[in-house]
Image (cartoon, grey):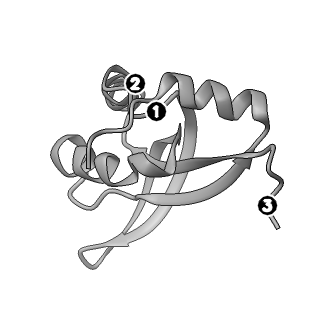
């Protein structure tokens, strides 16, 4: 059972190929008030198969802290502005402390449905 004092927060992760691309995407998300925070983790190494070829690439991981109601708007933003043809979009529902959850709520503007 969920603690009534904990508030739901959605954590979305994605990756891009450079710190410059990560900052641009992160700033766009913050400017549109679709997240309270976007953390940039440079130095990620990704091994993956794409179009039949094995890749070993440096990437930057973005961890986006938002509200569950913003998930669809973030998907739409990724479709238009993410630099990858097939961007990673992994969303995990989390329970935040009251103080952190209230901060996220205060910073995020949920788009109209």
Q: Is residue 80 left or right of residue 86?
A: left
- What number is the disc on residue 82? none
Instruction: Name which residue lies at 40% across and 29% down.
Output: 26
Foreground pick, 63 / 2: 2
Looking at the image, residue 56 sits to the left or right of residue 111; the answer is right
Q: Earlier in the sequence, mark 3 or mark 1?
A: 3
Q: Earlier in the sequence, mark 2 or mark 1?
A: 2
Front tag of 3 and 2: 3
Q: Which residue is mark 3?
A: 2
Instruction: Check the picture and name the quadrant holding the N terminus.
Output: bottom right
What kind of element bears circle 2?
helix
Residue at 57% across, 48% down = 11
The x and y percentages for residue 93 are 61, 58
As drawn, 28 above or below 93: above
Residue that badge 1 annotates: 35
Q: Residue 73 at what x, y percent from top left?
A: 29, 47
Residue highlighted by disc 2: 30
Of residues 76 and 68, the one drawn nearer to the viewer in this rendering: 68
């Amino acid at each position: 059972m969920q603690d009534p004092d904990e508030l739901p927060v959605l954590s979305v992760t994605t990756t891009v190929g450079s710190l410059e691309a990560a900052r641009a995407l992160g700033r766009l998300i913050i400017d549109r008030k679709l997240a309270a925070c976007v953390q940039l983790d440079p130095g990620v190494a990704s091994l993956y198969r794409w179009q039949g070829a094995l890749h070993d690439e440096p990437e930057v991981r973005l961890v986006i802290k938002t509200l569950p109601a913003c998930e669809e708007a973030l998907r739409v933003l990724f479709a238009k502005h993410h630099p990858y043809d097939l961007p990673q979009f992994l969303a995990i529902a989390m329970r935040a402390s009251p103080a952190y959850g209230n901060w996220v709520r205060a910073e995020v503007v949920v788009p109209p449905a």
